[in-house]
Amino acid sequence: MSMKTASTLRHSWIFFLLTFLFSWLVWGIMIIFPIAANYFVPLLFLGAFGPSIVALFLVTREGGIQALKEFANRIWDPRRIPWEWYLVIFFFFPAVLALGYFILFLLGGAPPDLNAYFGGINTTSDFLYLLIFMLLGGPLAEELGWRGYVLEPLQEKLGKLKASLLIGFFWILWHLPLFLIEGTSQNQKGFGIAFWSWILQLFFLSIIFTWVYNNTRRSILAAILLHLMANFAYPLNLDATGEIVFTIVRFAILVPLLLVWTGKTSKSEITTPM
Protein backbone atom coordinates (compact mmCIF):
# COMPACT_ATOMS: atom_id res chain seq x y z
CA MET A 1 0.00 0.00 0.00
CA SER A 2 1.41 3.37 -1.02
CA MET A 3 1.74 6.22 1.46
CA LYS A 4 -0.89 8.18 -0.48
CA THR A 5 -3.36 5.30 -0.36
CA ALA A 6 -2.70 4.77 3.34
CA SER A 7 -3.25 8.48 3.96
CA THR A 8 -6.54 8.62 2.04
CA LEU A 9 -7.82 5.50 3.77
CA ARG A 10 -6.89 6.96 7.14
CA HIS A 11 -8.87 10.08 6.21
CA SER A 12 -11.82 7.83 5.32
CA TRP A 13 -11.86 6.24 8.76
CA ILE A 14 -11.51 9.67 10.37
CA PHE A 15 -14.54 10.78 8.34
CA PHE A 16 -16.62 7.83 9.55
CA LEU A 17 -15.56 8.38 13.17
CA LEU A 18 -16.31 12.12 13.22
CA THR A 19 -19.58 11.67 11.34
CA PHE A 20 -20.87 9.10 13.81
CA LEU A 21 -19.71 11.16 16.80
CA PHE A 22 -21.45 14.29 15.51
CA SER A 23 -24.75 12.73 14.39
CA TRP A 24 -25.11 10.19 17.18
CA LEU A 25 -24.37 12.84 19.82
CA VAL A 26 -27.19 15.04 18.52
CA TRP A 27 -29.62 12.17 18.04
CA GLY A 28 -28.58 10.61 21.33
CA ILE A 29 -29.64 13.79 23.12
CA MET A 30 -33.02 13.51 21.38
CA ILE A 31 -33.37 9.90 22.55
CA ILE A 32 -32.35 10.49 26.15
CA PHE A 33 -33.92 13.86 26.91
CA PRO A 34 -37.43 15.19 26.24
CA ILE A 35 -37.28 17.64 23.34
CA ALA A 36 -39.70 20.54 22.92
CA ALA A 37 -41.66 20.39 19.67
CA ASN A 38 -40.09 23.55 18.25
CA TYR A 39 -36.58 22.06 18.64
CA PHE A 40 -37.42 18.63 17.21
CA VAL A 41 -36.92 19.30 13.47
CA PRO A 42 -33.85 21.58 13.89
CA LEU A 43 -32.08 18.96 16.03
CA LEU A 44 -33.12 16.16 13.69
CA PHE A 45 -31.69 18.06 10.72
CA LEU A 46 -28.56 19.07 12.62
CA GLY A 47 -27.76 15.41 13.22
CA ALA A 48 -28.56 14.56 9.61
CA PHE A 49 -26.01 17.13 8.41
CA GLY A 50 -23.19 15.26 10.15
CA PRO A 51 -21.72 13.67 6.96
CA SER A 52 -21.70 16.94 5.01
CA ILE A 53 -20.40 19.09 7.87
CA VAL A 54 -17.57 16.65 8.56
CA ALA A 55 -16.73 16.44 4.85
CA LEU A 56 -16.47 20.22 4.52
CA PHE A 57 -14.31 20.36 7.65
CA LEU A 58 -11.93 17.65 6.44
CA VAL A 59 -11.65 19.02 2.90
CA THR A 60 -10.72 22.45 4.27
CA ARG A 61 -8.36 20.98 6.86
CA GLU A 62 -6.57 18.78 4.32
CA GLY A 63 -6.44 21.10 1.30
CA GLY A 64 -7.29 24.61 2.41
CA ILE A 65 -9.44 27.13 0.56
CA GLN A 66 -8.39 25.90 -2.89
CA ALA A 67 -9.54 22.35 -2.13
CA LEU A 68 -12.80 23.75 -0.74
CA LYS A 69 -13.38 25.72 -3.97
CA GLU A 70 -12.81 22.60 -6.07
CA PHE A 71 -15.13 20.64 -3.79
CA ALA A 72 -17.79 23.36 -4.11
CA ASN A 73 -17.51 23.21 -7.90
CA ARG A 74 -18.48 19.55 -7.76
CA ILE A 75 -21.57 20.55 -5.75
CA TRP A 76 -22.81 23.44 -7.90
CA ASP A 77 -21.61 22.90 -11.48
CA PRO A 78 -24.36 21.21 -13.57
CA ARG A 79 -22.03 20.98 -16.59
CA ARG A 80 -20.18 18.07 -15.01
CA ILE A 81 -23.22 15.88 -15.65
CA PRO A 82 -23.70 14.65 -19.27
CA TRP A 83 -27.25 15.29 -20.48
CA GLU A 84 -28.11 11.59 -20.77
CA TRP A 85 -27.24 11.09 -17.10
CA TYR A 86 -29.80 13.72 -16.14
CA LEU A 87 -32.34 11.29 -17.62
CA VAL A 88 -30.97 8.53 -15.37
CA ILE A 89 -31.01 10.82 -12.32
CA PHE A 90 -34.59 12.02 -12.77
CA PHE A 91 -36.28 8.91 -14.18
CA PHE A 92 -34.45 5.87 -12.76
CA PHE A 93 -36.16 5.73 -9.35
CA PRO A 94 -39.64 6.69 -10.65
CA ALA A 95 -39.26 3.84 -13.17
CA VAL A 96 -38.32 1.42 -10.36
CA LEU A 97 -41.34 2.66 -8.37
CA ALA A 98 -43.68 2.17 -11.35
CA LEU A 99 -42.29 -1.29 -12.11
CA GLY A 100 -42.59 -2.43 -8.51
CA TYR A 101 -46.20 -1.27 -8.19
CA PHE A 102 -47.08 -2.78 -11.58
CA ILE A 103 -45.81 -6.21 -10.50
CA LEU A 104 -47.54 -5.82 -7.15
CA PHE A 105 -50.80 -4.96 -8.96
CA LEU A 106 -50.45 -8.07 -11.16
CA LEU A 107 -50.16 -10.11 -7.98
CA GLY A 108 -53.44 -8.72 -6.71
CA GLY A 109 -52.11 -5.80 -4.72
CA ALA A 110 -53.84 -2.42 -4.52
CA PRO A 111 -52.61 0.47 -6.69
CA PRO A 112 -50.51 3.11 -4.91
CA ASP A 113 -52.33 5.79 -2.95
CA LEU A 114 -51.43 8.99 -4.77
CA ASN A 115 -52.51 11.03 -1.75
CA ALA A 116 -49.53 9.54 0.09
CA TYR A 117 -47.26 11.25 -2.45
CA PHE A 118 -49.18 14.38 -3.40
CA GLY A 119 -51.71 14.87 -0.61
CA GLY A 120 -51.61 18.35 0.89
CA ILE A 121 -49.78 19.87 -2.10
CA ASN A 122 -52.28 22.42 -3.38
CA THR A 123 -50.12 25.38 -4.33
CA THR A 124 -46.71 26.11 -5.80
CA SER A 125 -45.51 27.24 -2.39
CA ASP A 126 -46.60 23.89 -0.90
CA PHE A 127 -44.52 22.07 -3.51
CA LEU A 128 -41.50 24.33 -2.97
CA TYR A 129 -41.71 23.85 0.80
CA LEU A 130 -41.79 20.06 0.35
CA LEU A 131 -38.90 20.23 -2.13
CA ILE A 132 -36.73 22.29 0.22
CA PHE A 133 -37.62 20.06 3.17
CA MET A 134 -36.72 16.89 1.25
CA LEU A 135 -33.58 18.46 -0.20
CA LEU A 136 -32.30 19.43 3.24
CA GLY A 137 -33.47 16.25 4.97
CA GLY A 138 -31.13 13.85 3.19
CA PRO A 139 -29.50 14.89 -0.10
CA LEU A 140 -27.69 18.05 1.05
CA ALA A 141 -27.26 16.77 4.60
CA GLU A 142 -25.51 13.56 3.57
CA GLU A 143 -24.15 13.47 0.03
CA LEU A 144 -21.22 15.85 0.50
CA GLY A 145 -19.90 13.15 2.82
CA TRP A 146 -20.97 9.71 1.61
CA ARG A 147 -20.32 10.25 -2.08
CA GLY A 148 -18.52 13.60 -2.22
CA TYR A 149 -15.77 12.82 0.27
CA VAL A 150 -15.42 9.17 1.21
CA LEU A 151 -16.49 7.18 -1.87
CA GLU A 152 -13.50 7.93 -4.07
CA PRO A 153 -10.64 6.87 -1.77
CA LEU A 154 -12.52 3.73 -0.82
CA GLN A 155 -13.17 2.64 -4.38
CA GLU A 156 -9.58 3.41 -5.36
CA LYS A 157 -8.47 0.86 -2.76
CA LEU A 158 -11.38 -1.60 -2.64
CA GLY A 159 -13.01 -1.28 -6.05
CA LYS A 160 -16.50 -0.03 -6.89
CA LEU A 161 -18.55 -2.87 -5.45
CA LYS A 162 -16.74 -3.33 -2.13
CA ALA A 163 -16.59 0.43 -1.58
CA SER A 164 -20.31 0.73 -2.28
CA LEU A 165 -21.15 -2.10 0.12
CA LEU A 166 -18.89 -0.68 2.84
CA ILE A 167 -20.46 2.77 2.55
CA GLY A 168 -23.88 1.10 2.50
CA PHE A 169 -23.04 -0.68 5.75
CA PHE A 170 -21.95 2.52 7.51
CA TRP A 171 -24.91 4.39 5.98
CA ILE A 172 -27.29 1.86 7.53
CA LEU A 173 -25.49 1.90 10.88
CA TRP A 174 -25.47 5.71 10.94
CA HIS A 175 -29.28 5.81 10.57
CA LEU A 176 -30.02 3.39 13.43
CA PRO A 177 -30.61 5.98 16.21
CA LEU A 178 -33.47 7.39 14.12
CA PHE A 179 -35.40 4.16 14.70
CA LEU A 180 -35.48 5.09 18.40
CA ILE A 181 -36.72 8.65 17.86
CA GLU A 182 -40.51 8.86 17.79
CA GLY A 183 -41.81 10.88 14.87
CA THR A 184 -39.20 9.85 12.29
CA SER A 185 -40.00 7.75 9.23
CA GLN A 186 -37.52 5.15 10.48
CA ASN A 187 -39.33 4.84 13.81
CA GLN A 188 -42.60 4.26 11.94
CA LYS A 189 -41.01 1.31 10.08
CA GLY A 190 -40.16 -0.50 13.30
CA PHE A 191 -37.93 -3.58 13.23
CA GLY A 192 -40.09 -5.96 11.22
CA ILE A 193 -39.89 -6.85 7.55
CA ALA A 194 -39.93 -3.16 6.55
CA PHE A 195 -36.67 -2.73 8.49
CA TRP A 196 -34.91 -5.52 6.59
CA SER A 197 -36.32 -4.29 3.28
CA TRP A 198 -34.98 -0.82 4.11
CA ILE A 199 -31.51 -2.28 4.80
CA LEU A 200 -31.44 -3.94 1.39
CA GLN A 201 -32.76 -0.72 -0.15
CA LEU A 202 -29.78 1.25 1.22
CA PHE A 203 -27.29 -1.26 -0.17
CA PHE A 204 -29.11 -0.95 -3.50
CA LEU A 205 -28.95 2.85 -3.33
CA SER A 206 -25.26 2.84 -2.45
CA ILE A 207 -24.42 0.78 -5.55
CA ILE A 208 -26.60 2.88 -7.87
CA PHE A 209 -25.16 6.11 -6.46
CA THR A 210 -21.62 4.89 -7.16
CA TRP A 211 -22.60 3.99 -10.72
CA VAL A 212 -24.00 7.48 -11.36
CA TYR A 213 -21.13 9.24 -9.55
CA ASN A 214 -18.55 7.42 -11.68
CA ASN A 215 -20.28 8.53 -14.87
CA THR A 216 -20.83 12.17 -13.98
CA ARG A 217 -17.23 13.31 -13.44
CA ARG A 218 -17.39 12.93 -9.65
CA SER A 219 -20.39 15.25 -9.46
CA ILE A 220 -21.72 15.73 -5.95
CA LEU A 221 -24.68 17.54 -7.51
CA ALA A 222 -25.56 14.31 -9.32
CA ALA A 223 -25.57 12.43 -6.01
CA ILE A 224 -27.71 15.14 -4.36
CA LEU A 225 -30.29 15.08 -7.15
CA LEU A 226 -30.32 11.28 -7.26
CA HIS A 227 -30.84 11.11 -3.50
CA LEU A 228 -33.71 13.58 -3.84
CA MET A 229 -35.37 11.46 -6.51
CA ALA A 230 -34.84 8.29 -4.46
CA ASN A 231 -36.68 9.95 -1.56
CA PHE A 232 -39.50 11.21 -3.79
CA ALA A 233 -39.97 7.81 -5.44
CA TYR A 234 -39.77 5.67 -2.30
CA PRO A 235 -42.66 3.15 -2.09
CA LEU A 236 -45.01 4.00 0.79
CA ASN A 237 -47.31 1.98 3.02
CA LEU A 238 -46.23 -1.41 1.70
CA ASP A 239 -47.36 -4.63 3.32
CA ALA A 240 -45.06 -7.64 3.63
CA THR A 241 -45.77 -8.76 0.06
CA GLY A 242 -45.00 -5.30 -1.25
CA GLU A 243 -41.70 -5.14 0.61
CA ILE A 244 -40.69 -8.51 -0.84
CA VAL A 245 -41.71 -7.52 -4.37
CA PHE A 246 -39.71 -4.29 -4.30
CA THR A 247 -36.69 -6.08 -2.84
CA ILE A 248 -36.78 -8.60 -5.71
CA VAL A 249 -37.20 -5.82 -8.29
CA ARG A 250 -34.20 -3.91 -6.93
CA PHE A 251 -32.03 -7.03 -6.92
CA ALA A 252 -33.06 -7.90 -10.50
CA ILE A 253 -32.13 -4.39 -11.64
CA LEU A 254 -28.72 -4.67 -9.96
CA VAL A 255 -27.76 -7.97 -11.59
CA PRO A 256 -26.62 -6.54 -14.98
CA LEU A 257 -24.63 -3.79 -13.30
CA LEU A 258 -22.97 -6.22 -10.89
CA LEU A 259 -22.05 -8.51 -13.79
CA VAL A 260 -20.28 -5.59 -15.46
CA TRP A 261 -18.54 -4.55 -12.26
CA THR A 262 -17.30 -8.04 -11.43
CA GLY A 263 -16.13 -8.58 -15.02
CA LYS A 264 -14.08 -6.28 -17.17
CA THR A 265 -14.55 -2.56 -16.56
CA SER A 266 -16.60 -1.04 -19.34
CA LYS A 267 -15.58 2.23 -20.95
CA SER A 268 -18.60 3.95 -19.46
CA GLU A 269 -17.48 2.98 -15.96
CA ILE A 270 -14.11 4.72 -16.12
CA THR A 271 -14.12 7.69 -13.77
CA THR A 272 -12.85 10.92 -15.31
CA PRO A 273 -10.35 12.46 -12.83
CA MET A 274 -11.70 15.99 -12.93
Image (cartoon, rainbow, N blue to C red):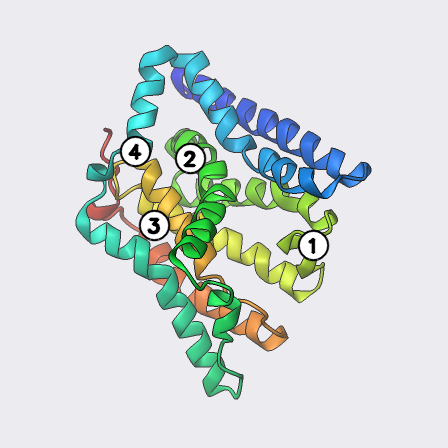
Measured in 3D between alpha carbons, the distance from the residue under mark 2 to the one under mark 3, in whole angstroms, is 16 Å
Neighbour tally class for label 2: few under 14, some 14-19, many 20 plus, Cα within 10 Å:
many
Mark 1 is surrounded, within 10 Å at the Cα level, by few (under 14), some (14 to 19) or many (20 or more) other residues, namely some
- Contact between marks 2 and 4 (CB within 8 A): the answer is no
Q: Is residue 6 visible?
A: no
Earlier-in-chain disc, 4 versus 3: 4
Q: Which residue is mark 4?
A: 76
x then y, percent, for residue 158? 43, 36
Using the image, tell me which numbered label, if any, was put on residue 187: 1
Q: Residues under labels 1 and 2: Cα distance?
A: 28 Å
Kindly identify the residue that appears in the image at 47 percent across and 24 percent down.
9
In this image, 81 relative to 254: left or right?
left
Quadrant of res 127: bottom left
Q: Is residue 13 above or below residue 247?
A: above
| Residue at the extreme right of the image, as rendered | 33
- Of tags 4 and 3, the one toward the viewer is 4
Question: Residue 40 placed where, x, y %?
Answer: 68, 41
At label 2, the amino acid type is Leu
**Could you tell me which residue is drawn at 39 percent across and 47 percent down?**
209
Is residue 270 among what the camera can see? Answer: yes
Q: Say which element carries label 3.
A: helix
Find disc 3 in the rendering and name its residue: 261
Please tell me whether mark 1 or mark 3 is closer to you in this view. Answer: 1
Per the image, the residue denoted by label 2 is 151
Q: Position of residue 219 (x, y in %)?
A: 30, 37
- In front of the other: label 2 or label 4? 4
Count the marks: how many? 4
Q: Quadrant of the C terminus?
A: top left
Instruction: Identify the residue at image location x=70%, y=30%.
Output: 25
Query: Label 1 to label 3, Cα distance in Å?
Result: 35 Å
Query: Dividing the image into 4 quarters, which one contains the N terminus?
Result: top left
Q: Earlier in the sequence, mark 1 or mark 4?
A: 4
